[in-house]
Image: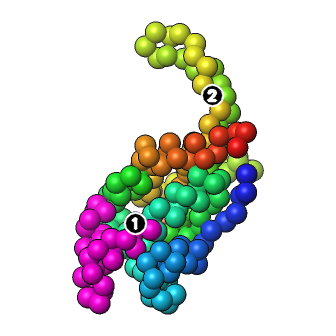
Amino acid sequence: MSEKTLTRMDLSEAVFREVGLSRNESSQMVESVLAHMSDALVRGEQVKISSFGTFSVRDKAARVGRNPKTGEEVPIHPRRVLTFRPSHLMKDRVAAGNRSGK
Amino acid sequence: MIRSELIQKIADEHPDLSQREVERIVNTIFEEVIEAMARGDRVELRGFGAFSVKHREARTGRNPRTGEAVDVDEKHVPFFKTGKLLRERLNGA
């Protein structure tokens, strides 16, 4: 497995290459996509990208946690968490691409 | 929000680009993330989150209906971890 880490730069490079915008515009578009998705999620909306996956916001109830080092009880406040459910297409492509022996 | 609404919002902000172009741009971005994960790579988007691939060992599972043992092959599954900034924003920071 190659195990590289891609960043925003690689995504904007792909936009530059595939669509032919300038590098500057390409990186703005990547920012724009992430910003709109984040804003929708912060408003509590689900973000459903067909053939990619679904991001949803879930409410977690308060509970009593424990500091694993000291054993001390600590209250965990109610909070909102984001979950991502990959599409079937993404799951299939990730499974196929990483099959051992490749 | 669905893909077409995301495309619309971005198109509204960029009157210099056609709807078709914005569609290609958005699709390219999502496609690039999937391709990276299919190669076993991570995609780290600071402030938003990181996509990575997790390995699941082969195991003996059970058909919950019949209780019958079934072999489950090892596999690789997509995983997303929310970024710190987005996690804080979700909680009103």
The image quadrant of residue B74 is: top right
Q: Mark 2 belongs to which subunit?
A: B
Q: Secondary structure at mark 2?
A: loop
Q: Is residue A80 magenta?
A: no
Q: Residue at x 55, y 70 (%)?
A: B45
Which segment did they paint magenta?
A: B1-28
Residue B27's tag is: 1
Q: Nearer the viewer, residue B2 or B32?
A: B32
Residue A4's tag is: none
Q: Nearer the viewer, residue A54 or A2?
A: A2
Q: Residue at x 28, y 61 (%)?
A: B2
Q: Residue at x 43, y 43 (%)?
A: A88
In the image: residue A6, left or right of residue A58: right
Q: What amino acid type should be assigned to the residue bearing mark 1?
A: Asn
Q: Residue at x 70, y 39 (%)?
A: A100
What secondary structure prevails in the magenta region?
A: helix
In the image: residue A31, left or right of residue A9: left
Q: To which residue does mark 2 refer?
A: B73
For the residues carrying marks 2 and 1, which lies nearer the camera in this image? 1
Q: Position of residue B4 (x, y in %)?
A: 26, 65
| Spatial CA span between label 2 and label 1 | 32 Å
Q: Are the residues at dot 2 and dot 1 in contact (C-beta closer than 8 Å)?
A: no
The image quadrant of residue B19 is: bottom left
Is residue A53 shown above or below B29? above
Sequence-wise, which precedes: disc 2 or disc 1? 1
Q: Secondary structure at mark 1?
A: helix
In the image: residue B32, left or right of residue B3: right
Res A56 seen here: no
Res B6 seen here: yes
Q: Position of residue A73 (x, y in %)?
A: 62, 49
Q: Is residue B24 magenta?
A: yes
